Amino acid sequence: MKFLKLFLVVYLVMLPVSALAGKAKTIEELAAMYDSSSCKECHAEIYAQWEQSHHARSLMGVLGGLFMTPLAMKGKTPFSPDSPEEATIDTFPCFKCHLPQARVDADDAFAVDYAKALLAQDKARLGKLRITCIVCHNTKAIIHKRSEGHPEAGVLYGSKEIADHGDKIFKKVKKSSIMDHAIMCGQCHGMGPNLEFENPVQCATLYGSYQHNYLSKGGQKQCQECHMKKVDGLADHLLAPNWNDLDGTKKLLQDAISLDVDTVGYDWLLKSKDHKPMVVVNTRINQNAGHRIPDG
Amino acid sequence: MTAKSTDGKEVYNTERHYHPQATDCRSNKMLYGAQVKTQYIRDTSLQPMETKSESFEIFLPEGVRTVDVKVSLRYEIWKPDHNIIITEFNKTVSLDR
């Protein structure tokens, strides 16, 4: 009996806080668990930037498209279930980056609810699921889990420590080892095919490009230096580009890409007495971003 | 890129596409969609800190000695007709002095 008590105590201590709270079974439950709307009370500017970002609509692509819909449709992808009732978390490998909290804090009942919402194209409900402040500043803030432990409940992680954060739930901010490093972004803006799934999934390869084809040329900037430039002393959480903002994206592209063109018109003497009127256009596209373009 | 004669007739039109291209490794058919892409088979994208150079030779039809050249660099988002024009170049090029 004494051993059983000890086992129970140890077992309960080892359980993550999320397990005690239970896993989300619906879209609304998961959205509530990761709701960051209280952050805007003190961080209004950052919150407003984030609301315009793709992180705030991570399940929707350009112009609001629900790109995961084929995964919920019978026969459309290797992951698709025969019916939405048979959906599981593994039906949606894209959760790995587009909704990381689903792999941590949701169970298969959530996947069923999500599949049904996709088939119904219910953007109002699906739009509640976002990569919120908590995802980056808690869930994804620690990658050295064996060295530093798992992210703690009630703690946020940032680029600097704040002993008294002043929030009712997240009372302190600890310094993350990676928050201002490229690997923070590289967790999702990835390396290449994701081979841990039962079928390969290849989405973003941007961090691979950064590692192998930018650093090798002497580039030393972190992702945050270009994509989270300081605005009034604070990192811009728009995390541009916002593909729905064509003017803003155009400016970003123009900062990274330039085009030089030279032309000449002449009569080319291909062979004796056979002049060919010709115009030659020489183009040079210069690219100074820290990764291939396009990528994601 | 296009070239038009002074009467507006198009005498040249070509495109270059710069992007990584993938298959599912089960056929040689190029595919879009993360859930099916498996491996890049070709990568023509713009690489960091590199210059992509092209030289286009436009042989003019008989009687045409002057053309209006237009080079447009675009970023396609999601589909070809939804794009951003990053920059454009326009110049009249003549073979005659």
Image (cartoon, rainbow, N blue to C red):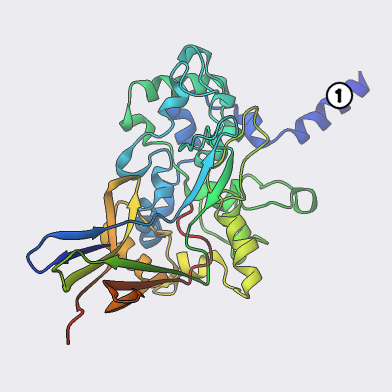
**Residue at 38 percent of width and 57 percent of height:** B16
Residue A39 relative to residue A269: left or right: right
Q: Which corner quadrant holds the C terminus of chain B?
A: bottom left
Residue placed furthest toward the left: B7
**Residue at 64 percent of width and 31 percent of height:** A197
Where is residue A245 drawn, in percent x and y?
28, 56
| Residue at image mark 1 | A5
Residue type highlighted by circle 1 = Lys
Badge 1 local density, few (<14 within 10 Å), some, or many (20+)?
A: few
Any part of residue A163 in sight:
no
Where is residue A187 drawn, in percent x and y?
61, 50
Where is residue B74 drawn, in percent x and y?
31, 59
**Residue at 47 percent of width and 12 percent of height:** A83
- Local secondary structure at mark 1: helix
In the image, residue A245 above or below residue A283: above
Where is residue A68 drawn, in percent x and y?
44, 31
Closer to us: A38 or A276: A276
